[in-house]
């Protein structure tokens, strides 16, 4: 719990090289993240179900495919902008990423 609180404070108040985001209870541990260009998000599926992280934001579209329970996937953001990320399987799972 303390680690999650630290990541939340770090992710929302500072520019980071890599931010860890867990998926648990069909929710992302973060709702908003700010990164610098070239930074990454490490998505950790700590849930008991498969997820599928993707974005359809124009100019930032990606789809990592199925992410099974226990699997970790890293996505790097190569240009500035605002990116909306969702789980294709659980559409209520959302993150807004601002890349500066």
Image (spheres, grey):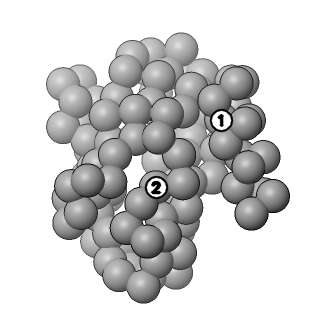
Q: Name the residue under label 2.
A: 28
Q: Position of residue 54 (x, y in %)?
A: 27, 50
* Element carrying mark 1: helix
Q: Mark 1 points at which residue?
A: 11
Q: Is residue 84 visible?
A: yes
- Frontmost residue, 72 versus 25: 25
Residue 56, placed above or below residue 29: above
Q: Where is residue 74 in the image (x, y as percent from the top left)?
A: 51, 54
Q: Where is residue 98 in the image (x, y as percent from the top left)?
A: 47, 22
In-image side of 98 versus 63 (left or right): right
Q: Position of residue 95 (x, y in %)?
A: 40, 41
Can you say which quadrant of the picture contains the N terminus? bottom right
In-image side of 92 versus 30 (left or right): left
In-image side of 26 versus 66 (left or right): right
- Frontmost residue, 79 versus 8: 8
In terms of image quadrants, where is residue 65? bottom left
In-image side of 70 versus 65 (left or right): right
* Residue at 60% from the left image edge and 22% from the top image edge: 36
Contact, CB < 8 Å: mark 2 with mark 1?
no
- How far apart in space, not on screen, are marks 2 and 1 (Cα)? 13 Å
* Element carrying mark 2: strand
* Residue at 24% from the left image edge and 63% from the top image edge: 90
Q: How crowded is mark 2: few (under 14 residues within 10 Å), some or many (20 or more)?
A: many
* Residue at 78% from the left image edge and 46% from the top image edge: 6
Residue 45, placed above or below residue 39: below
Q: How crowded is mark 1: few (under 14 residues within 10 Å), some or many (20 or more)?
A: many
């Amino acid at each position: 719990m303390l680690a999650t609180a630290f990541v939340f404070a770090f992710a929302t108040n500072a520019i980071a090289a890599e931010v860890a985001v867990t998926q648990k209870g069909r929710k992302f541990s973060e709702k908003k993240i700010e990164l610098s260009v070239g930074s990454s998000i490490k998505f950790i599926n700590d849930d008991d179900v498969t997820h599928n992280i993707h974005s359809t934001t124009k100019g930032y579209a990606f789809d990592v495919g199925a992410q099974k329970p226990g699997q970790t996937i890293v996505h790097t953001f190569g240009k500035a902008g605002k990116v909306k990320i969702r789980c294709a399987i659980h559409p209520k799972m959302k993150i807004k990423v601002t890349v500066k």
